[in-house]
Image (spheres, rainbow, N blue to C red):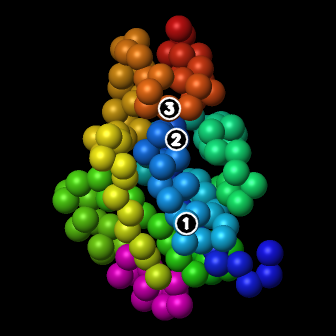
Amino acid sequence: MTGARVAVYPGSFDPITRGHEDLISRALTFADRVVVAVAVNTAKQPLFTLAERVALIQQAVSDPKVDVRSFEGLLADFARAAGAAVIVRGLRAVSDFEYEFQMALMNRNLAPGIETVFLVPAFDLTYLSSSLVREVARFGGNVSALVHPAVRQALEQKFGR
């Protein structure tokens, strides 16, 4: 797709939730292609390995206009290499804004031609986070409405259910 408008949606996706899926599908309303960029974050101890997170996203989002890749290093460098015009970030609450605003300004400094767009999740998904999903699953709660069936199954396997 030459000349396609590419958006990069970065995150740790540990695991991908219905909220992430919502933002990916809404990003496709203004981008021809979305690259889901699964970050290697050495500061975090993820539940799922990098390969598992990539595979779960691929199962949850089967749209051919969505590409899933892992990356390490600066998001601005990854976005530039992916040919992105836009970085998509989700804002669930006002508390997310200060950090996301700071990151958007730094990315603008590092890659001036790439804009950051903030999307708010669907109203019924605003409370949802990967850490909350992990916590509910860890204690045997029902996460069926919160994640794709493949993710629910992977969580059950991780927690021995």
**Residue 126 location in percent, x, y?**
30, 46
Let me know if residue 77 appears in the view.
no
Position above or below: 59 against 12: above
Residue 128, by quadrant, is top left
- Is the residue 153 above or below the residue 116 in the image? above
The answer for how far apart the CA atoms under marks 3 and 2 are is: 7 Å
Vertical side of 153 occupied by 94: above or below: below
Q: Tag 3: Cα neighbours inside 10 Å, few (<14), some, or many (≥20)?
A: many
Mark positioned earlier in the residue sequence (3 or 2): 2
Which corner quadrant holds the N terminus? bottom right
Q: Which quadrant of the figure has residue 82?
A: bottom right
Q: Can see residue 66? A: yes
Mark 1 Cα shell of 10 Å, populated few (<14), some (14-19), many (≥20)? few
Mark 3, residue position: 147
Q: Secondary structure at mark 1?
A: loop
Front: mark 3 or 2: 3
Q: Name the residue furthest right.
A: 1
Asked if the magenta segment contains residue 141, the reply would be no
3D distance between C-alphas at marks 2 and 1: 20 Å
Q: Amino acid at mark 2?
A: Ile
> Which class describes the residues within 10 Å of circle 2: few (<14), some (14-19), or many (20+)?
many
Q: Earlier in the sequence, mark 2 or mark 1?
A: 2
Tell me the CA gap for discs 1 and 3. 22 Å
Q: Assess whether mark 2 and mark 3 are in contact (beta carbons under 8 angstroms).
A: yes
Closer-to-camera residue (112/24)? 24
Q: Where does the magenta region start and end?
A: 104-114
**Majority SS type along the magenta span:** helix
| Residue 104 x/y as whole percent | 38, 76
In terms of secondary structure, where does tag 3 sit? loop
Mark 2, residue position: 16
Which residue is identified by label 1?
A: 29
Amino acid type, mark 3: Val
